[in-house]
Amino acid sequence: MTNVPLDLKAIGIRNEHLVLCMLSRYGRMSQTQLRRRTKLSVSTLSYIISRLRSKQLINESKGSSSSRGPKPMIISINPRGAFILGVDISPNSLRIGLFDFEVELVESKLIRLDNNEPEHVCSQIASCAFGLLSGNSIDPQSVLGIGVGLSGTIKSDGSVELSSPMGWKSVPVKEMLQSRFCFPVSMFTTRTRLLAETESSGAGDKNVMYVNVGSGVGSHIISDGRLLRGATDNAGEIGHIVIDPDGPECGCGNFGCLETFISGPAIARRIRHDIENGVNTSLSERCDDNMLPESIIAELALAVKSRDRYSIRLQSDIAEQLASAVAVAINFYDPQKIILGGYVALQCFDAMKEAIFSAIKTEVYDSTARQITIVPAKAGEDALVIGCARAVLEEKMAF
């Protein structure tokens, strides 16, 4: 029998991660409490704490005690000990956030994209990321990693197999970015929004459907407390339900997908087209060709509030098209809560909520037995950026 030598360095790193994981999960605690959580010996834990102290990854402060004698030292994560970057890639813009070790936002930037060619997008991500680090006097060596999220299918090697909103197929995004950074790059789908949303909303419902309507259209399903992924990690793609086979071509290669009608870019194109063809609407004065879809949707919401007839009809059409797709998904997944997120859904929330409840009555089996609540996403437009940062931390702290 051959004796395999212990990798003491790897064991030490693992124990460091274990201690940091416990502090991240349960908050500040004494060394005695840490020992109970980690099951490490007194000597091992003391050694690990000294290593984390030297790396400035923890803070220590004197606690209180009801008994006589020395007060216990309370150990907590040093928020400035490490940093994480999160990125949200969409067809017209990049949203990049810099987070501390507790995933609290330090600073974020929104960059407009004049084109979405992969090389250009990756260059913009690197430029903005290093700008955020430099502007906050942060050494890149203290960055745990950068999490990059987008709508699409991502392979295990970090390449984007297909992203219909971006028009990308077989793009090695992780490889392209990793060559620009000295810290790890992780790729995520929009499913990581749920990490930000559950953090904002807290634990609770076990059957949830998160519906995102923004630059793309999709949904994510939590069933009996577990996230559904599917055989190819494509569960919940309601944006690619074909609602009109003679409709516009979608980035996925099919025609008439829901996404081609109610995504932000699709709505912006429709509004511009209708204005050019002389439709009577106040949007003709509110919108111009240089506006991002996010800005046009915001103007649409304002026009609805001012009782612009065209805008009211358009919003109603969008809501009804989404509602029918959601009704199909309800029949499949039986959620108790529906969360509407994405800049289109958040601007049109009331209309979409009303349309979904109406569709439930006429298009959902045994609708009277279902007690479904519909709420807006709490994490807001930064949801994917926050989710990517949290996913990076979870990767580093996984036990």
Image (cartoon, rainbow, N blue to C red):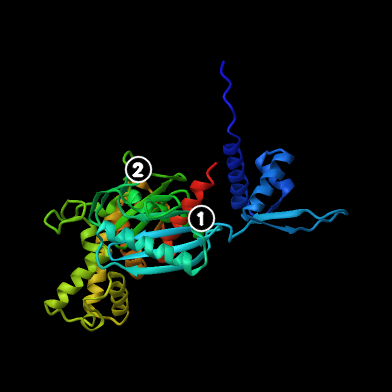
Q: Position of residue 344 (x, y in %)?
A: 32, 66
Q: Residue at x 22, y 79 (%)?
A: 288
Q: In the picture, residue 354 is in which quadrant? A: bottom left
For disc 1, the neighbor class at 10 Å (few under 14, some 14 to 19, many from 20) is few
In the picture of the structure, the residue carrying the numbered disc 2 is: 157
Q: Residue at x 44, y 63 (%)?
A: 97
* Left or right: residue 369 compared with residue 328: right
Disc 2 from disc 1: Cα separation: 23 Å
Instruction: Compare residues 157 and 360 and report the one nearer the observer.
Output: 157
Give SS at disc 1.
helix
Q: Earlier in the sequence, mark 2 or mark 1?
A: 1
Q: Residue furthest top?
A: 1
Note whether residue 338 is visible. Answer: yes
Give SS at disc 2.
loop
* Left or right: residue 249 compared with residue 21: left
Report the quarter where the N terminus lies. Answer: top right
Note whether residue 371 is visible. Answer: no
Q: Residue furthest right?
A: 68
Q: Is residue 166 above or below residue 162?
A: below
Q: Is residue 33 above or below residue 99?
A: above
Q: Is residue 11 above or below residue 131?
A: above
Q: Which amino acid is tagged 2?
A: Asp
Q: Residue at x 43, y 67 (%)?
A: 131
Q: In the picture, residue 2 is in which quadrant? A: top right
In the picture of the structure, the residue carrying the numbered disc 1 is: 141
Instruction: Compare residues 54 and 162 and report the one nearer the observer.
Output: 54
Q: Which amino acid is tagged 1?
A: Gln
Q: Position of residue 166 (x, y in %)?
A: 26, 57
The label shown at residue 46 is: none
Q: Residue at x 61, y 41 (%)?
A: 15
- Mark count: 2
